[in-house]
Every structure is written in structure tokens, then in C-alpha cells.
């Protein structure tokens, strides 16, 4: 039976204590700089982002240099990378980016340089809080406590796991697609089903890792699944859904043959793909929200239009860089809260851990991003999020920002501990739970309730049940041996 073998070393989250101090210091400095920043002093934002980006690149270099095991078991490496992309490089659009793209981004909500520096300071303080929370988390205790549950399924072969992930994941995605193209109102896909769609990416990862009998055939199916997933992502008009299968493929190759050259090539490919897709996918979502026809044929027609020969015309507008700049959304969220129109996600917190199967009238957890978009634009046909940290501020001010950051840090530290236990055991079947932390870290541009607490609640409840069963079984086995 093939075991998961990953080169490199794993590290405990305590190593993030020093970076948390540095990022926190930069955040506090930016917060002080707000008082001296004029409405059009965009150079201040440039200095804050550039200095932080340099330090973040040093942190990322160290993370990848430690090897594949570090990247697999430390979601905070992914967190810093995604943070750098969205909240640092993306923010630089307003300083050194193309004027037309910057103007387009600023049209969504009135934003000044002072506002931009302030929300960037919030992001940095939020990141520092996440890393600080990880540093004080009892991760070794959690790692030890999950080992019985991991051992419960230790004998499953990697080939069977691949086919299970593929069949369940593809089935879930087709069900979601069938509902999304339906014209019937009131039809809702269970959150569990939507979560299961992520198993296709895990099937890609497991498939490319497979090296046993019929490896060639499994690899061909894996490539075909990658293309299938990519096409479905386009039909969903979701750039993350398009990028994830490609990322899973590269990550699987990296786990097999860890190399800095492969990392550079993978990052370059993914960055190019992101920049190529960002504007067309954004335009497709805008067009899709304006028409009642949700059919497959209409989706293909929209894709043909945004990727067609006239896609680069000025009317199509925003540009790829503008699509990864979240400053404006964050300024809007802060302004809404301070104007008495903040979010009400507190009422959703308890529902996160309740299955919809048991309570069909459970509130829609993903409504947060849609409601936010409606408050700003007046339309509920699209979703928008101010990012992990500002989403906390949007609901409860500074208390919410610190609370969301602390909880996100503990959630990611939990999955980091599970990942280390998975790598230590060589178990393939538990990769989904182990890699969920990396996926959640990548969604730092999302919403705390939707992208962090929701997945954590849905997956940890059944996992804890399995852990209880495993420990009960172990006690019974010991008792039988003694008697």
C-alpha cells in the first residue's frame, strides 16, 4: 500500500511569533501614518505596501526552502502568500497601476488615500493577530489527539481513495451545476454538497501522487479531471474554481519532486492564469447578473463574448489588476459599519454547526457576501467580500476584527496540527482535512463566516465523531487484551 512520503521538515506554529511582531509593527506604523496622510497622498500607501511586500517575500522564501512538508503542513505560508497578492500587490494598483484600471476600481465606492492606508493597517494588524493566535495554540496536543481517528482508515489504498474522491466530487459538482442552471426558485443545494465539490481537486492531487500499478492510466484520468474541473470553473464564472485544479496538479507534482524551480514555474503559471482570467470572469459575472437566463447555453454564450475578439475593448473595462484589488471593498465595509449599516453575521454563528438536513429552514450562511454587495451596489445577483479581517470589523468594529483574526488563527492552527499528523502517518485518505487549512488560508480575500467558520463547522463535527469512535474502539481493544 502506497504511503504519503513528503520531503522536508515540518514546523510548529510558534515560529510565526516573530513575523507576527513584524507585521503588527508595520500595521501600527501604518495606523499612525493615517493621521499624516492627505486625501491624495497615495505614495504613503505605496511605501506601506512595498516595505511589507519585501518582508513577506523573505518569509515566503524561507517557507518554501524548508521543503514540501513545510508547505503541506503550514497553512500560514499560504496565508502570507495570498495576503501579499490581494492586500499588498493588489493595493499597489492605486499607486503605480494603470490609470484606467485604478479609476475603474475607485468607481465602485468613493475612496481616498487616507482610507486606503487605514484599511491596509487593519489588514496588517489582523494578519499579525492570526499569526500570534497560532503561536499560542496548543498544536502539539491537538496533533496527538487526532492520531486515533487518522489510524482508523489507515488501510485504504491510494487508488481506491482517488476513485472515491473523483466520483463523489464530480457527482457533487454536477448536482450544484444542475441547480444553478435551474430556473426553479427556492431550490437550494446543501452546504455539505457544495463542500464535497472540493473533492475533485483532492482527486487530482492524489492521482498525480499515485505511483503504483496502472499509474499511467491514473495520471491520464487525472489530467482529464483537471481539464473538466477547469471548464466547470469557467461555467461557474469563478476564477478560484478555475485555479484550484491547476494548483492541485502543481502541488501534487511538488510533493513528488520538490524543487524551487518547480515552485517558481508554478507560481508564474498560476499568476499568468489569474491575470488572464480575472477581467473576463469578472465581466462574465456582471453580464450574468443582468439576465434571467441561467442555462448552460447562455453561460457558454457569455464566455464566448468575454473571451472573444472584442473582449479587450474599452467597454469591457476593469482589467485584471483591478480584480485583485480589495481596498475599495474594504473601505466600503468600514464606512458601512461606522454609518450604522454593518453586517449581522453574529446571528449566523450558531447555525454554522447545525446540518441543514436536520433544520431545512436554517439561514443561508453564504448570504453575507451577497448582502454586502447589495448594500453597496443595490444588486443581490453577485457577491462581494471585504476580506477576512475587515469582515470582522464590518460586523463588530475593532472587537470583530480581533475576534475574527483570533478564531481564524486557531482554526488554521487546528488544520496545521491535523496536517502534521497526516504527514507523519503517511495517510492519503485524510489529505482533504489536512489540506483544508491551506485552502482556507488562500481565501483570505473572502469572509470569515463563509470561508473560515462555515467549513470548519461542517467538517470538524463529523471528524470529532470519528475521533470518539476511534478512541472508544482503542479502549475496547485494550480491555479485550487485558481480559
Image: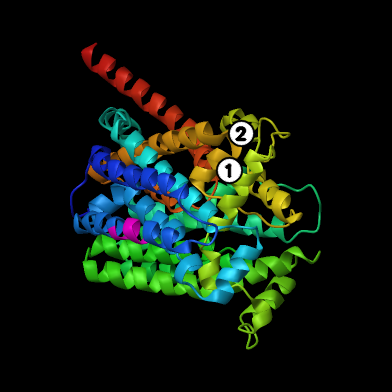
Q: Name the dominant secondary structure of the magenta segment.
A: helix
Quick check: marks 1 and 2 in contact, CB under 8 Å? yes
Tag count in the figure? 2
Residue 58, how many percent across, how many down? 24, 58
Query: Closer to the camera, 301 or 269?
Result: 269
N-terminal label among 1 and 2: 1
- Determine whether the residue tagged by mark 2 lies in a helix, strand or loop: loop
Image quadrant where residue 470 sits: top left
| Magenta stretch: includes residue 347 | no
Give the residue displayed 59% in from the left and 54% down from the top: 329
> Which residue is disc 2 drawn over?
355
Is 313 placed above or below 1 here? below
Neighbourhood count class around disc 1 (C-alpha, 10 Å): few under 14, some 14–19, many 20 upward: some
Residue 104, how many percent across, how many down? 62, 69
Is 26 placed above or below 465 here? below
Q: Which residues are magenta?
A: 50-54
- The answer to whether 11 appears left or right of 215 in the picture is left
Give the residue displayed 18% in from the left and 49% down from the top: 9
- The answer to whether 257 appears left or right of 90 in the picture is left
> Which residue is disc 1 drawn over?
192
Neighbourhood count class around disc 2 (C-alpha, 10 Å): few under 14, some 14–19, many 20 upward: some
- Determine whether the residue tagged by mark 1 lies in a helix, strand or loop: helix
Query: Closer to the camera, 418 or 81?
Result: 81
Query: Closer to the camera, 453 or 432?
Result: 453
Give the residue displayed 61% in from the left and 33% down from the top: 355
Q: Quadrant of the C terminus?
A: top left
Residue 436, how many percent across, how many down? 42, 47
Image quadrant where residue 344 sits: top right
Amino acid at each position: 500500500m502506497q504511503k504519503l512520503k513528503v520531503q522536508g521538515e515540518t514546523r510548529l506554529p510558534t515560529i510565526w511569533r516573530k513575523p507576527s511582531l513584524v507585521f503588527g509593527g508595520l500595521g501600527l506604523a501604518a495606523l499612525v501614518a493615517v493621521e499624516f496622510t492627505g486625501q491624495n497622498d497615495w505614495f504613503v500607501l505605496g511605501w506601506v505596501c512595498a516595505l511589507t511586500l519585501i518582508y513577506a517575500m523573505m518569509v515566503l522564501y524561507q517557507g518554501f526552502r524548508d521543503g514540501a512538508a513545510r508547505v503541506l503542513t503550514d497553512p500560514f505560508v499560504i496565508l502570507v502568500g495570498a495576503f501579499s497578492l490581494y492586500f499588498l500587490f493588489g493595493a499597489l494598483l492605486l499607486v503605480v497601476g494603470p490609470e484606467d484600471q485604478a479609476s475603474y476600481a475607485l468607481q465602485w465606492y468613493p475612496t481616498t488615500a487616507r482610507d486606503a492606508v487605514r484599511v491596509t493597517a487593519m489588514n496588517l494588524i489582523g494578519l499579525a493577530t492570526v499569526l500570534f493566535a497560532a503561536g499560542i495554540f496548543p498544536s502539539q496536543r491537538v496533533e496527538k489527539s487526532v492520531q486515533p481517528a487518522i489510524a482508523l482508515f489507515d488501510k485504504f489504498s491510494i487508488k481506491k481513495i482517488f476513485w472515491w474522491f473523483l466520483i463523489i466530487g464530480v457527482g457533487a459538482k454536477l448536482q450544484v451545476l444542475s441547480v444553478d442552471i435551474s430556473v426553479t426558485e427556492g431550490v437550494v443545494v446543501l452546504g455539505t454538497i457544495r463542500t464535497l465539490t472540493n473533492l475533485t481537486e483532492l482527486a487530482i492531487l492524489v492521482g498525480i501522487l499515485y505511483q503504483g500499478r496502472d499509474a499511467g492510466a491514473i495520471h491520464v484520468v487525472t489530467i482529464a479531471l483537471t481539464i473538466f474541473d477547469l471548464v466547470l470553473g469557467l461555467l461557474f464564472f469563478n476564477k478560484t474554481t478555475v485555479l484550484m485544479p491547476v494548483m492541485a496538479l502543481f502541488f501534487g507534482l511538488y510533493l513528488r519532486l520538490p524543487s524551487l524551480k518547480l515552485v517558481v514555474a508554478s507560481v508564474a503559471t498560476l499568476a499568468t492564469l489569474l491575470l488572464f482570467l480575472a477581467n473576463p470572469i469578472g465581466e462574465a459575472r456582471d453580464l450574468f447578473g443582468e439576465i434571467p437566463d441561467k442555462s448552460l447555453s447562455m453561460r457558454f454564450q457569455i464566455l464566448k463574448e468575454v473571451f472573444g475578439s472584442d473582449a479587450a475593448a474599452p467597454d469591457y473595462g476593469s482589467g485584471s489588476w483591478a480584480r485583485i484589488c480589495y481596498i475599495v471593498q474594504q473601505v466600503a465595509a468600514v464606512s458601512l459599519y461606522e454609518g450604522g449599516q454593518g453586517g449581522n453575521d453574529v446571528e449566523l454563528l450558531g447555525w454554522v454547526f447545525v446540518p441543514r438536513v436536520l433544520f431545512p429552514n436554517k439561514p443561508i450562511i453564504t448570504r453575507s457576501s451577497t448582502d454586502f454587495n447589495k448594500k453597496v451596489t443595490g444588486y443581490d445577483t453577485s457577491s462581494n467580500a471585504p476580506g477576512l479581517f475587515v469582515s470582522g470589523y464590518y460586523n463588530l468594529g475593532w472587537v470583530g476584527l480581533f475576534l475574527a483574526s483570533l478564531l481564524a488563527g486557531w482554526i488554521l492552527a487546528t488544520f496545521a496540527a491535523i496536517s502534521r499528523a497526516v504527514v507523519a502517518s503517511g495517510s492519503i485518505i485524510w489529505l482533504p482535512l489536512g489540506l483544508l487549512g491551506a485552502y482556507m488560508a488562500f481565501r483570505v480575500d473572502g469572509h470569515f463566516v463563509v470561508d473560515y467558520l462555515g467549513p470548519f463547522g461542517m467538517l470538524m463535527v463529523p471528524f470529532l465523531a470519528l475521533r470518539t469512535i476511534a478512541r472508544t474502539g482503542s479502549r475496547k481493544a485494550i480491555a479485550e487484551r487485558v481480559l
